[in-house]
Image (cartoon, helix red, strand yellow):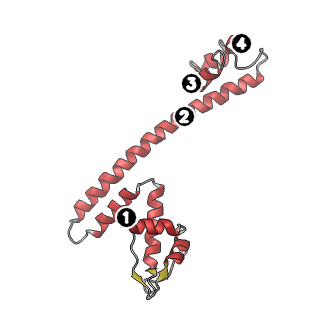
Amino acid sequence: MASAGSTNNLIKIGALARNAHVSLRTLRYYEEIGLIAPASHSKGGHRLYSGEDVKKLEVINYLKSLPLSLEEIKEIFTVKKSTPTREKKEQVAVLIKLLESKLGAVNGRIQELSGVKDELSGMVDILRECARCEGKPLLEIESCGDCKAVDRRGHAPLMMSVFLERGA
């Protein structure tokens, strides 16, 4: 992302949106929920932002990709802002709790996707053998029900059972 320059150089909301690769609507929403605030306003009432706001939006976009919700991102920024009144250990404990929760969710999703990958790989392997099969019509219970490709795996992938049903 392009930097808007030093904190002394204020930019309008449109330039901030371009620099941060977000829409004006997104910036207004972030302002509405308290994630970002203009550093100042022009005489004409335009929102003006600092170069630090571009950096903050980069961090927000990165945290969204983790994926953290906007509420969680706001909580992270709130913890950071509360430095004078909160002890550092308390800040760290809040961040650990939040990020450990996300890590658990990501690990769960990885396990789910690993299972999906195994099912798809099994289906592709069986279908490759189907393509080489000299039997009658492919994917019919009468001709494929005792297929050796399925027997070698010990079970047919769930998706395969849909194809092998009568009338499917």
Residue identifier under label 2: 116
Q: CA distance from mark 3 to mark 1?
A: 44 Å
Quadrant (top left/top right/bottom left/bottom right) for the N terminus:
bottom right
Q: Nearer the viewer, mark 2 or mark 1?
A: 1
**Neighbours of disc 2 within 10 Å: few (<14), some (14-19), many (20+):** few
> Which badge, 4 or 3, is on the more N-terminal residue?
4
Under mark 1, the amino acid is Ile
Residue for badge 1: 33
**Residue sitting at x 26%, y 62%:** 91
Residue 138, image x, y percentages: 74, 19
**Do the CB atoms of the residues marked 3 and 1 lie less than 8 Å apart?**
no
Q: Secondary structure at mark 3?
A: helix
Q: What is the crowding at mark 4: few (fewer than 14 residues within 10 Å), some, or many (at least 20)?
A: few
Q: Position of residue 35 (x, y in %)?
A: 38, 66
The residue identified by callout 3 is 158
60 left or right of 87 in image? right
Residue at (32, 60) in percent of width and height: 75
- Amino acid of disc 2: Val
Residue sitting at x 22%, y 60%: 90
Where, by quadrant of the figure, is residue 118 drawn?
Answer: top right
**Percent from the top left, x then y, of residue 140?**
70, 16
Query: Of marks 3 and 1, which one's residue comes earlier in the chain?
Result: 1
Along the viewing direction, whichever of 26 and 159 lies nearer the viewer = 26
Q: Secondary structure at mark 1?
A: loop
